[in-house]
């Protein structure tokens, strides 16, 4: 999603193939795994006092 937003901001027209990028490169499964792990770690960090505030911000800055 972030990739499409950045390319849409940079280029005037965005081809439909950009929306199908994960499917055409067969990377959708690894992308789904990374997003699942990120959500699991964020859930576990919510059980700590400091981590509940810091980790969502640090994971947001992590490139996929």
Image (spheres, helix red, strand yellow):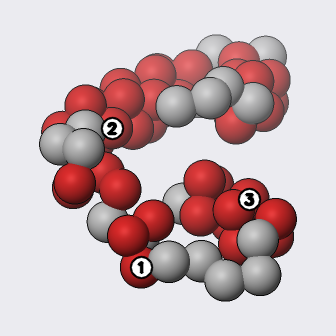
Front label number (3 vs 2): 3
Instruction: Examine the rendering and report whether any part of residue 40 can be seen.
Output: no
> Going from the N terminus, do you reach mark 2 or mark 1 first?
1
Q: In terms of secondary structure, where does tag 1 sit?
A: helix
> Going from the N terminus, do you reach mark 3 or mark 2 first?
3
Task: Classify residue 41 as left or right of residue 3.
Answer: left
Task: Classify residue 24 as left or right of residue 44.
Answer: left
CA gap between label 3 and label 1 equals 15 Å
CA gap between label 2 and label 1 equals 19 Å
Q: Residue beneath label 3, please?
A: 6
Task: Classify residue 37 as left or right of residue 47.
Answer: left
Residue appearing at x 59%, y 77% in the figure: 14
Q: Position of residue 39 (x, y in %)?
A: 43, 36
Q: Nearer the viewer, residue 29 or 15?
A: 15
Mark identifier at residue 16: 1
Residue appearing at x 38%, y 70% in the figure: 17
Q: Few, some or many C-alpha atoms within 10 Å of disc 3 (few <14, some 14-19, many ≥20)? A: few
Q: Nearer the viewer, residue 62 or 39?
A: 62
Front label number (3 vs 1): 1
Q: Few, some or many C-alpha atoms within 10 Å of disc 2 (few <14, some 14-19, many ≥20)? A: few
Q: Residue beneath label 2, please?
A: 31
Residue appearing at x 73%, y 59% in the figure: 6
> Going from the N terminus, do you reach mark 3 or mark 1 first?
3
Q: Position of residue 21 (x, y in %)?
A: 35, 56
Q: Position of residue 3 (x, y in %)?
A: 60, 53
């Amino acid at each position: 999603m972030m990739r499409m937003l950045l390319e849409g901001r940079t280029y005037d027209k965005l081809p439909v193939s950009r929306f199908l990028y994960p499917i055409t490169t067969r990377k959708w499964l690894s992308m789904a795994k990374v997003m699942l792990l990120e959500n699991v770690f964020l859930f576990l960090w919510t059980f700590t006092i400091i981590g509940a505030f810091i980790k969502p911000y640090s994971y947001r800055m992590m490139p996929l």
